[in-house]
Image: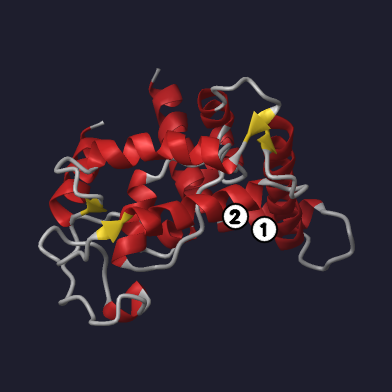
Amino acid sequence: MRKLALCATLGVIGLLLTASPALAQGGGRGGMNQVVPQQSADDNEPRAARIGEYHPHEYLKPIGVERFDKAVAAMFARADVNRDGMVTLAELESLLTARREEAIRARFHDIDTNHDGAISLAEFTAWQQDMGSAAASQCAAYAARLVPDTLAPELANNDRDDALADVIEPLSALVITRANIHYRAGITLDDLLAYEHKRFNAVDTNHDGFLEQPEVEAVRRAAQAR
């Protein structure tokens, strides 16, 4: 039982490091415990330049539904591989498969240090040793290879986009199924927007068409509690 718990813990760590480069670099979205300086007047300034992450007392400019829709539309466009205005389960799976294969090739390249197209025992041993104590667990050795089964929106590194990332549900097979209320081969952008707007409206508790700091904080607290 203790071995399974260790594997589960290490697996989550590997997933976080692979799925979120920001987390791997010590950043990450929604870091509630890090104190930051006052927000820059330029909301587009990279957060890294301001040192730290989101703080509950940092002012967050209200986020309108137009900005929300733009982020959802960009996520949809990435998944619409054949550009026919519809995203199918097959399209999403092909995109995720390509990302997994890319991750596998990148890892092979890292292990194959002499780049001869083959991994020797010495190269593999060196790679495992670089992993340190994590290499002692088989599940930990494979956890870093995990790629999320979702397609998240690509957003900038600033407070407002961090808030959007907490509200927008990443595109997944489940999202496509739930949003496909017309039982078509796939979903359109309108289908996805209608689905995501339910999340926006649930967070927008004062129903003014904007996501504001107290509303976003409530979402983050609920996520942490889960």
* Residue behind mark 1: 126
Residue 209 sits above or below residue 114 on the image: above
Instruction: Name the quadrant containing residue 8.
Output: top left
Q: CA distance from mark 1 to mark 2?
A: 5 Å
Q: Position of residue 158 (x, y in %)?
A: 34, 68
Q: Amino acid at mark 2?
A: Gln
Residue 41 located left or right of residue 12: left
Residue drawn at the location 53% of the way across and 40% of the way down? 190
Residue 219 located left or right of residue 186: left
Q: Is residue 60 visible?
A: yes
Residue drawn at the location 33% of the way across and 73% of the way down? 47
Q: Amino acid at mark 1?
A: Ala
Residue 186 sits above or below residue 153 on the image: above
Answer whether labels 1 and 2 touch (C-beta < 8 Å). Answer: yes
Q: Nearer the viewer, residue 99 or 144?
A: 99
Residue 49 located left or right of residue 108: left
* Quadrant in which the C terminus appears: top left
Circle 1 crowding by C-alpha within 10 Å: few under 14, some 14–19, many from 20: few
Residue 4 sits above or below residue 224 on the image: above
Q: Nearer the viewer, residue 148 or 184?
A: 184
* Residue behind mark 2: 129
Residue 88 sits above or below residue 159 on the image: above
Q: Nearer the viewer, residue 207 or 30?
A: 207
